[in-house]
Amino acid sequence: MSERFESRRGKLLHSMRKLGVDALLVSGESNVSWLTGFTGDSTWLVLGPRICVLVSDGRYEIQLSEECPGLEVLIRKPEVKLHDALAKVVNGAGLSKLAFESHLLTFAAVEEIRSALPDVELCPAVGQVEELRAIKDVEEIAEIRAAVDVAIRGFYAVRAVLTPELTELNIAHELEQTMRRLGAEGTSFDSIVAADDRAALAHYRPGRMPIGDCSILLIDWGANTAGRYKSDLTRVLLFGKPTNKLVKVYETVRDAQQRAIAAIKPGVTCGEIDSVARGHIKDQGYGRRFSHSLGHGIGLDIHEAPRLAPNSQTVLRPGMVVTVEPGVYLADWGGVRIEDDVLVTRDGSEVLSARLPSDLESMLVD
Amino acid sequence: MSERFESRRGKLLHSMRKLGVDALLVSGESNVSWLTGFTGDSTWLVLGPRICVLVSDGRYEIQLSEECPGLEVLIRKPEVKLHDALAKVVNGAGLSKLAFESHLLTFAAVEEIRSALPDVELCPAVGQVEELRAIKDVEEIAEIRAAVDVAIRGFYAVRAVLTPELTELNIAHELEQTMRRLGAEGTSFDSIVAADDRAALAHYRPGRMPIGDCSILLIDWGANTAGRYKSDLTRVLLFGKPTNKLVKVYETVRDAQQRAIAAIKPGVTCGEIDSVARGHIKDQGYGRRFSHSLGHGIGLDIHEAPRLAPNSQTVLRPGMVVTVEPGVYLADWGGVRIEDDVLVTRDGSEVLSARLPSDLESMLVD
């Protein structure tokens, strides 16, 4: 296992060369975890050609020795601040130029580091580790597949026991409990379960009213595996005979998603994929009703690189795993979002959640 | 309800005067929520004597109109960045000096705001809203009481069904499920359930091995109410007759906690409270084994102001609610932590979790 992390650190050291610094301060929790295997928080990694040290505290002393055997660790005492412990490491190694993750460290934390290291040049760096993390290796893809599979099984289990008496919150909790029973740590984010007009709220929190005889039930959920890789899916269940309007909205969103997925392949930009879906929805007259980006990478984080967003110049590469999730939301009526997890392959893409159909017919609940 | 938020904004406007700025950019999710009632994310509040605007995006348009009636809202389009939408608001209002939450905004976000607002002076400000949030009002204290009560009921329910076949993870999930059944949204953080030597890991994640015939079972858990106020408790269950060493460690931690709680009253600094517990543990020979701070405020966040940490000069005031959680951790053996939630009252303190005993006798499981 530790070779896996060593190899990742090797890749980072290589890609860091262009920064021209003595070391990078890795402060992001998932970034530290991806580079070392450590699963706790409040721990920084200082990595450079001549240095590799974790700066942590007493709560994690034993855990670090178990999860990161062989890595050098500085344990600070409760009365020593993290940035002061960092300063000790940086000065001890005689580093004069240190890059930091400016998109993750707060402004105040950078000021504190600056005061603690007055003679060290601090250089903002964005997304160094995230860029590497965007390309998943074989084990990571297997973990995401497992997260997708558990999520799908959870969905089927919950769909099978739906009754009008259940609240949105009951359904969300039932989903989580089922996925846990199947081996997941839990959900990858707080599930969204939204009936009828609530489905128009793209980031709704489930409520405590029974779903009753709703027509639309939007469920956006995902599983978090034991290895902490995540899935993220959305389906909309339709109760009774859908109205013409609902059919039109549903088919618009589904077509937009299918077209976007068909366009995914190495070399295409994320912005182009977003515009395929967005263009179709606009053509159908719902342009203003698709109020968010098309998708995002998934992995150790539920939102990571790359983003499928308007104008994004990021180029798709094999090994990237992204959600594709167009939606149309109409106030006081409801909404439809369809979301799958898609792996970019050498010659196109593979929908990891393909075995969960999303055609309208399959979404009808008797 | 909206008067409650208006009154909070009034308090902030008053305390902001000393900053000498035209407005404060409130970017922290819990801070925005505390000031407006909005429960989503990715939304900033610009607040000053002449301005009060929420900057958000289409996902939240409907939710904002429901949760924050009467508040001015700017909805940006997906292709407009948050900092550019902010610039529009700030320039539109003719503001020339803007404070920002430097402990919450990333360094990169501040750089982006700076580029978008080249003619506006940006002033770092730390903890303006958090300082107000540290003092809970009557409704907030009632919410925290509810979170404590649900957590206690969950603990009793799970304690009643403990069997050697259950894994730490089973127990964590059972605890959450029970608290949800009792009306909680879920846990206030990922529960820690740690048997024997794992109890030495202060921030352990529950594992998949049955607890079997363990001697020590440390459980650190809390509930999140529907209103999103949180509780945070720890108890250590003891199976079989405890060894002399275990008794000594247990009583040391409990005495340290009782002494610290007895010292809590308005006017005392957080550092003094920390040192009461730390001093006692040191006197008993375990000084180096208490590897974290004594406690922290709880409220909308699971960790908030004030912190009971070494040397903290923050003065306790009535209405503050803090955890008091000393611990002693011995590698390859185990650990004991006892944690209660304590309200600072006018003349001392009230242990909100007092009805869950923590004396050694009460922790013995047959």
Image (cartoon, coloured by chain):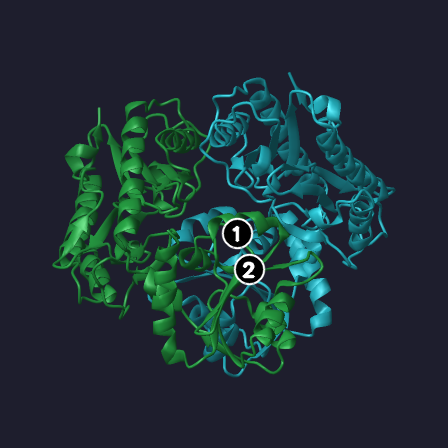
Chain colours: A green, B cyan
Q: Where does label 2 land, which residue?
A: A73
A198 left or right, relative to A308: right
Sequence-wise first label, 1 or 2: 1
Q: Residue at x 15, y 34 (%)?
A: A361
Which quarter of the image is occupied by the C terminus of chain A?
Answer: top left
Query: Chain for mark 2?
Result: A
The residue closer to the viewer here, A216 or B247, is B247
Q: Residue at x 24, y 57 (%)?
A: A319
The answer, for residue A177, to whether it is visible in the render is: yes
Amino acid at circle 1: Leu
Residue A233 in the image, given as x and y percentages of width and height: 29, 43
Q: Residue at x 43, y 66 (%)?
A: B82
Q: Which image quarter: residue B364?
A: top right
Q: Where does label 1 land, which residue?
A: A64
B249 left or right, relative to B74: right
The residue closer to the viewer here, A203 or A273, is A273
The relative height of residue B119 versus residue A291 in the rendered view (above or below) is below
SS at mark 1 in the image: helix
Residue B160 in the image, given as x and y percentages of width and height: 58, 18
Amino acid at circle 2: Val
The residue closer to the viewer here, A133 or A77, is A77
Q: Residues within 10 Å of mark 2 (few under 14, many from 20)?
A: many
SS at mark 2 in the image: strand
What separation in Å lies between label 1 and label 2 (alpha carbons)?
Answer: 8 Å
